[in-house]
């Protein structure tokens, strides 16, 4: 299951506005960077605004103000259903007056309810604003990860009104003749890569807006780079729980909802969204072996049991992955398969699972915990009814921040406890501040 950004049937405008105009501190959601005014361009036709990702936010509401006076009468424009941490605002209709406008942003949950205050109003003409942008802006955070994922997800802040995009991925050549690896066709915000990157080297990607027929409507974005290195001592094979992403709208290219971020041990992400254990087994040779891991964390099965695959079939696949590991000198470490919360599946159109899904999940996890190396990450995510805790998920399938942090810390601590001979030599990047 890949993350989806479209949320229909929701009226969002009133929720955050009402929240802002009561007496509450506003600095807790402040936007970083200098607030001092900078030189405005001669013609300000649009401005791209940025803010930090807010944990738990599915979407954002952006409000343009005539001045710092934060009242309903001072509102120029309200932009709803912004599904990334930035937006380009068209301003040409307001002429010179736009240069004195301010803006603020409020984080919202799935239902359009504010989960925090508006940011402090900030001048549009200030440091951190991109004036009259001519290309989308990449938002991936591969440089903050210990390793680039085998299956990257590319994301960006689109130019105003753009609904279709073209993405190119290039491999750098030391002699200067870079090689085009592939071209992808995307919708508004992001694209999931189906072709894995296992060949060591330096890569970069770029994106531009196009029409539905492929005609370019923007310049190419700046290059965004990632490195593929080998060997990687610890890797993780799995589905979307391993691949990353959360709260429906934040893709795996961000670190916030990737459990690998919170592991105290650096882990190579070999997750692939939507994978069953059969698919994980099928791609083992292609995706795992090039990285020559000493230890492989194996976490899969949720797409099996929720799709009607019998627990025994899942165990056969996991056992085959285990046997492949052993034959190649890799130590397999199993993580229990996480629960689901079917009551929330309708939010993103996930199919209703079989009524006996818990039986198969329990059967799989009982087998997992009998393996030589196994770590339980599911029990703490489970409510009294045996389902994924509602406060840990937005779509009912994927754990969000709290769940992913718990998974990462639990797996990482287990690896340090059992494989200190390996983990003590590894250098971990610091997890980003929340």
Image (cartoon, rainbow, N blue to C red):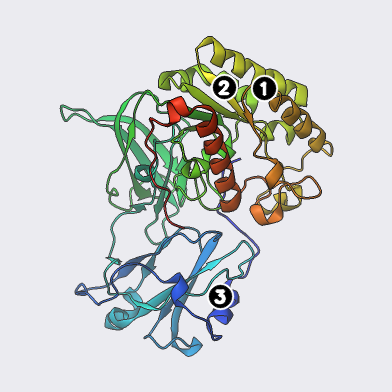
Quadrant that contains the N terminus: top right
**Pointer 3 and pointer 1: residues touching (CB < 8 Å)?**
no
- Place residue 154 in its image quadrant: top left
**Pointer 2 and pointer 1: residues touching (CB < 8 Å)?**
yes
In the rendered image, residue 38, in percent from the top left (x then y), is placed at 21, 74
In the rendered image, residue 289, in percent from the top left (x then y), is placed at 46, 18
How far is disc 2 from disc 3 in space, using C-alphas? 48 Å
Q: Residues within 10 Å of mark 1 (few under 14, many from 20)?
A: some
Front residue of 363/185: it is: 363
Residue found at x 32% / y 25%: 200
Which residue, given by chain and number where applicable, does mark 1 sit on? Answer: 371
Which residue, given by chain and number where applicable, does mark 2 sit on? Answer: 332
Question: Could you tell which of marks 2 and 3 lies nearer the N-terminus?
Answer: 3
> In this picture, is 413 found above or below 256?
above
Query: Left of 419 or right of it: where is 428?
Result: left
Residue found at x 54% / y 53%: 249
């Amino acid at each position: 299951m890949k993350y989806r950004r479209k949320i229909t049937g929701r009226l969002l405008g009133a929720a955050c506005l009402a929240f802002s105009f009561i007496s509450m501190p506003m600095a807790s959601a402040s936007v970083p960077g200098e607030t001092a005014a900078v030189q405005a361009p001669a013609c300000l036709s649009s401005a791209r605004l940025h803010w930090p990702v807010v944990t738990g936010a599915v979407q954002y509401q952006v409000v343009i103000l005539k001045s710092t006076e934060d009242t309903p009468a001072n509102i120029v424009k309200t932009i709803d259903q912004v599904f990334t941490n930035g937006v380009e605002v068209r301003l040409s209709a307001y002429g010179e007056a736009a240069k004195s406008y301010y803006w603020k942003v409020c984080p919202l949950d799935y239902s359009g309810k504010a989960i925090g205050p508006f940011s402090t109003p900030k001048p549009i003409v200030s440091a951190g604003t991109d004036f009259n942008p001519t290309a989308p802006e990449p938002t991936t955070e591969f440089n903050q990860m210990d390793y680039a994922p085998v299956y990257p997800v590319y994301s960006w802040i689109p130019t105003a009104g753009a609904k279709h995009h073209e993405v190119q991925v290039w491999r750098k050549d030391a002699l200067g003749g870079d090689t085009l690896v592939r071209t992808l066709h995307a919708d508004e915000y992001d694209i999931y890569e189906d072709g894995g990157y296992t060949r060591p080297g330096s890569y970069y990607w770029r994106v531009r807006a196009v029409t539905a027929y492929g005609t370019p409507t923007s310049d190419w974005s700046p290059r965004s780079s990632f490195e593929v290195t080998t060997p990687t001592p610890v890797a993780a094979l799995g589905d979307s729980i391993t691949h990353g992403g959360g709260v429906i709208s934040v893709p795996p290219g961000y670190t916030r909802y990737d459990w690998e971020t919170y592991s105290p041990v650096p882990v190579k992400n070999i997750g692939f969204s939507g994978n069953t254990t059969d698919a994980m087994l099928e791609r083992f040779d292609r995706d795992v072996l090039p990285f020559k891991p000493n230890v492989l964390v194996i976490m899969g099965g949720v797409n099996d049991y929720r799709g009607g695959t019998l627990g025994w079939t899942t165990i056969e696949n996991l056992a085959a992955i285990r046997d492949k590991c052993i034959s190649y000198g890799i130590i397999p470490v199993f993580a229990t398969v996480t629960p689901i919360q079917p009551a929330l599946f309708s939010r993103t159109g996930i199919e209703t699972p079989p009524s006996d899904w818990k039986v198969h999940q329990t059967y799989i996890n009982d087998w997992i915990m009998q393996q030589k190396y196994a770590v339980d990450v599911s029990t703490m995510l489970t409510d009294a009814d045996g389902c994924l805790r509602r406060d840990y998920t937005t779509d009912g399938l994927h754990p969000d921040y709290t769940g992913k942090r718990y998974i990462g810390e639990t797996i990482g601590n287990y690896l340090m406890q059992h494989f200190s001979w390996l983990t003590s030599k590894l250098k971990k990047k610091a997890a980003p501040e929340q």
